[in-house]
Structure formats: structure tokens, C-alpha cells
Image (spheres, rainbow, N blue to C red):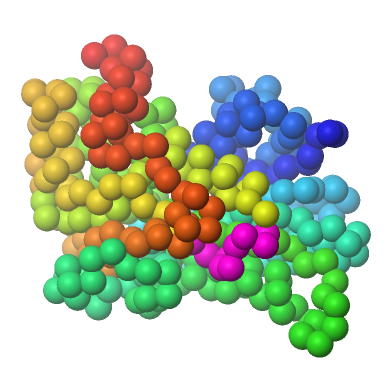
């Protein structure tokens, strides 16, 4: 079979870098990347072409590309988005809208359903209080869709835009054979942790920041309370989920948006795990009200039974395997500990 053409936006981000590597390793794809930044050396050779610049303005250059699949990862994450709301809206919503319009246009014009993979987030949820957060436990996709953050509002709305362009645009096909529409698939990711990269601008960042600091003997002041609990996942599982969902036949999917989960732990449990691996780690807690408010509005955990049922989702890394088989061995290699 000939190569498929894939676009990965936000290729320099954490998910982006890992996805470029895994998609290249999988084979069969010519990968076009885009980002506001130049590609890091580690993935330069894996990209056939890198389009650098602001996606909102760069999308027009993609109208001539015969993409089979688009991974639209470019985004301003939750803490940053809360400081620069208008910019976040432009990047997160306008950028997504431009790319969805391109994919919808090309899908219809060339009668080819372009796949559009979109990372949504636990930020799409909004819990009204800590008591309700504890009571709710693992939430389902259609519960508590009342985000408190600009980033969460952006993600939830873009999920709806994806559904619109993949199903309803033009409103003309309820009683007639639909034209080829783009094939939109979204995953609501928990906080992601990579042993190779660090996040920036997010709010689940305290997890990876604490672990990377501990592994380097750097003191870390955690910006949320000890009891703060949300769902986390190893980066390889996040990449696996995108690659698995990408290949699922459309007829097996009855939704466009899926939760996935791996392990839900508190900030104090992170500290205990860090101390067990690096006994000299200095980790203190100094809750930042703004960032605390963001994480408190996110659910403790998510119910991923839909993904498990419809596309056999199953993470490779539970909390023990995450530390013992992935994070600690890799981080020790990286920092020589
Ligand atoms: N990890 C992201 C953030 O903290 C949420 O998707 O912003």
C-alpha cells in the first residue's frame, strides 16, 4: 500500500514529539509537521516537511495537501490559557476551526473521509465543588460538561465543532445520501507524564514537574494541595490510544468523544512515590489559588468504559507499571541516577 499523508500540528509539544516518533516507527506514513517553533533535532529527520508559524494563518497553505489523517495537537494549555484568554481562544478554537474547515472541504470535494484526531481533555469537565468532585468519582463523557476554564471551554466547544463538521455541516443529508464528511475522533486525555519531555503551561504539570525535579535532586514546591486528585497517564499510553483509535473502523464507533483513564492518584501519593525512588527528594506544598481552582474543578477520575467497549482501549501502564517499568528506568537513564 502506498504511504498515507499525515499532518501533525503542535509537533514540538509533548504529545507531538512522542507521536511523530511512534507514527514514524509504525511506518506507512509521510509525516508533515507544523508548529510555532522549529522542530527539535530528535524528530527533525522523521518529518518530511515542517511548516513553522501560527497555525491560524498557515492553514491556507495546507489546502493543496492530500492529507489522509490530521492529528491536531496545537493548543495553549490550561494555566497559560487562563492568563491570556483571548490568545488561547484564537489558538485553541480558531486554529481548530480553520483546520476542521479544511478537512471538511477536502473530504467533500474529493469524496474522501479525512480522519481528524483531536486531543480533548479532562478540562472539558467542571465540578461545582470539592464535595461533588469526591461524590462523583469517575465521570462519564456526558456528565459535568460545564468547564470552568478557558481551555476547558475551548476543548468542549471544539469537540462540538468536530461533530458539526463531521456530521451536520450544510444540514443536507438527513434524508439523502450524505457526502463524504470528515471523520472526527476525540479523546479526553487525563494529565500526561513523559520521562523525556516536560509540559509547559498546563495545570496537571505538577505531577511530571515533581517527578523530574526529584530525579534531579532539585527541590520542588508543588502548586496544589496534598489531597488534590486527578487522573494521569503515561505518555506511551496516550500515543497508543491515538494510534489505536485512528485505526478503528468508523462503524465500530458510536461516539466522537471518548474518555480514557489509567490511574488516579493524589499529589501526596506522587510525593510518596518520588520519595521511595529518590529518598533525598525535597518536595513541599504551596497551593496557588488560581491553579488549585483549576484542578479542583477537574474530576477525580474518568470512566472509560465506552473506549474499552468500542475500541478495546486498555492502558499498558497502571500506577505500579508506570513507575516501575516506564518512568523510573527511563528517568534514571536520562539523569544518570
Ligand atoms: N494537561 C492539560 C493541562 O494541564 C489538561 O489537558 O492543561
Q: Which image quadrant is residue 7 in?
A: top right
Q: Is residue 81 left or right of residue 93?
A: left
115 vs 23: above or below: below
Q: Residue at x 34, y 47 (%)?
A: 262
Residue furthest out toward the top: 336
Q: Is residue 122 above or below residue 42?
A: below
Q: Residue 97 in the image: x percent, y percent?
A: 66, 67
Is residue 149 visible in the rendered image? The answer is no
Q: Quadrant of the C terminus?
A: top left
Q: Residue at x 45, y 54 (%)?
A: 308
The answer to whether one can see residue 114 in this image is yes
Query: Residue 92 appears in which quarter of the rendering?
Result: bottom right
Q: Quadrant of residue 228?
A: bottom left
What residue is shown at x 37% (from left), y 76% (from top)? 143
Position of 185 compared to 296: left or right?
Answer: right
View extreme (right): residue = 110
Q: Position of residue 63 (x, y in %)?
A: 84, 55
- Considering every residue shown, the one lying at the far bottom of the view is 175
User: Horizontal and vertical percent for residue 174?
Assistant: 77, 85
Between 286 and 306, the one nearer to me in the picture: 306
**251 is within the stretch colored magenta:** yes
Q: Which residues are magenta?
A: 250-258
> Is 291 on the left or on the right of 6, as rendered?
left
If the image is split into quadrants, where does the N terminus sit? top right
Residue at x-position 30% and y-position 34%:
322
Q: Is residue 104 magenta?
A: no
Amino acid at each position: 500500500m502506498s504511504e498515507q499523508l499525515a499532518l501533525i500540528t503542535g509537533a514540538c509539544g509533548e504529545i507531538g514529539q512522542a507521536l511523530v516518533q511512534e507514527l514514524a516507527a509504525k511506518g506507512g506514513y509521510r509525516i508533515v509537521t507544523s508548529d510555532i517553533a522549529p522542530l527539535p533535532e530528535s524528530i527533525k529527520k522523521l518529518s518530511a516537511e515542517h511548516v513553522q508559524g501560527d497555525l491560524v494563518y498557515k492553514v491556507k497553505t495546507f489546502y493543496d495537501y492530500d492529507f489522509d489523517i490530521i492529528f491536531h495537537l496545537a493548543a495553549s494549555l490550561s494555566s497559560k490559557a487562563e492568563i491570556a484568554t483571548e490568545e488561547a481562544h484564537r489558538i485553541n478554537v480558531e486554529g481548530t476551526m480553520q483546520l476542521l474547515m479544511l478537512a471538511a472541504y477536502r473530504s467533500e470535494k474529493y469524496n474522501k473521509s479525512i480522519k481528524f484526531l483531536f486531543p480533548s481533555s479532562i478540562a472539558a469537565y467542571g465540578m461545582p465543588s470539592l464535595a461533588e468532585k469526591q461524590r462523583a468519582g469517575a465521570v462519564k463523557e456526558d456528565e459535568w460538561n460545564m468547564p470552568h476554564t478557558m481551555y476547558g471551554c475551548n476543548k468542549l466547544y471544539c469537540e462540538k465543532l468536530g461533530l458539526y463538521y463531521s456530521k451536520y455541516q450544510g444540514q443536507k443529508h438527513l434524508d439523502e445520501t450524505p457526502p463524504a464528511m470528515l471523520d472526527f475522533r476525540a479523546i479526553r486525555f487525563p494529565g500526561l507524564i513523559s520521562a523525556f519531555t516536560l509540559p509547559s503551561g498546563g495545570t496537571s504539570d505538577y505531577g511530571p514537574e515533581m517527578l523530574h525535579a526529584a530525579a534531579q535532586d532539585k527541590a520542588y514546591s508543588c502548586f496544589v494541595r496534598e489531597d488534590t486528585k486527578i487522573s494521569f497517564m503515561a505518555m506511551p499510553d496516550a500515543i497508543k490510544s491515538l494510534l489505536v483509535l485512528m485505526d478503528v473502523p468508523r462503524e465500530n464507533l458510536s461516539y466522537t468523544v471518548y474518555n480514557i483513564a489509567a490511574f488516579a492518584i493524589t499529589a501526596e501519593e506522587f510525593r510518596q512515590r518520588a520519595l521511595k525512588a529518590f529518598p533525598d527528594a525535597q518536595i513541599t506544598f504551596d497551593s496557588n489559588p488560581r491553579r488549585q481552582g483549576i484542578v479542583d474543578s477537574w474530576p477525580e477520575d474518568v470512566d472509560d468504559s465506552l473506549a474499552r467497549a468500542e475500541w478495546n482501549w486498555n492502558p499498558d501502564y497502571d500506577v505500579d507499571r508506570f513507575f516501575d517499568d516506564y518512568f523510573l528506568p527511563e528517568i534514571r537513564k536520562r539523569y544518570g541516577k
